[in-house]
Image (tube, rainbow, N blue to C red):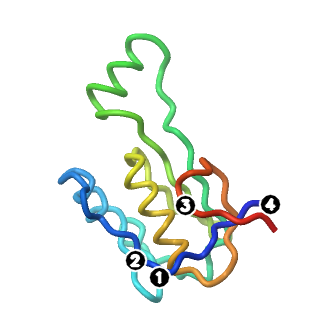
Amino acid sequence: MTYLQRINYRPSTDGFSDKELQYLQQHFDAYGAELLADGQPVRWEWIEEVEVVKAARPVGPTGWIVKNLVMGGERYHVGVYYGSQEAIFANATLRVAQYIVKTIAYYAAQRIHYKGPDDLTPLTEI
């Protein structure tokens, strides 16, 4: 199984666009005790799994228009699963998705199962 590897530095938002910073401000905040997903608290010790997937888009011209003109490029969904609940960060840029995953890897002390692209954050196999 693949798990998030704990990192010893807090991720930075340096270089983020105004829209990316606004997305984080509206949907995600994190500090020592918990993360806030759209204002809902999720304690670090509750988190069991994180999953990152590319946002689905229709194939053909419509999909290209939505992806490139409406959304401004490829988008990702980040799912944080705890107990029978979930927090979903939808339509995040790759940089925002990476920031969310790395922030979880920074704060959470327990092993968290991970599914998604291998290059977002350091991972470990146990």
Mark 1 and mark 3 lie on one chain; the one further toward the N terminus is 1
Please name the residue that numbered disc 2 is placed on: 30
On the picture, is 82 further left or further right than 96?
A: right
Mark 1 and mark 4 lie on one chain; the one further toward the N terminus is 4
Check disc 4 and report its element: helix, strand or loop: loop
Please tell me whether mark 2 or mark 3 is closer to you in this view. Answer: 3
* Amino acid type of the residue that numbered disc 4 sits on in the rendered structure: Met
Q: Work out whether 103 lies above or below 107.
A: above
Please name the residue that numbered disc 4 is placed on: 1
Q: Spatial distance from mark 2 to mark 4, Cα to Cα?
A: 26 Å
| Residue 34 image offset from top left, x and y in percent | 47, 82
| Residue 30 image offset from top left, x and y in percent | 40, 77
Q: Work out whether 45 lies above or below 122.
A: below
Please tell me whether mark 3 or mark 4 is closer to you in this view. Answer: 3
Which quadrant holds the C terminus?
Answer: bottom right
- What's the mark number on residue 45? none
Please name the residue that numbered disc 3 is placed on: 121
On the picture, is 126 further left or further right than 117?
A: right
Residue appearing at x 39%, y 70% in the figure: 11
Q: Spatial distance from mark 1 to mark 2, Cα to Cα?
A: 6 Å
Please name the residue that numbered disc 1 is placed on: 34
As drawn, the residue found furthest toward the bottom would be 33
Mark 3 and mark 4 lie on one chain; the one further toward the N terminus is 4
Query: CB under 8 Å between callouts 1 and 2?
Result: yes
Check disc 1 and report its element: helix, strand or loop: strand
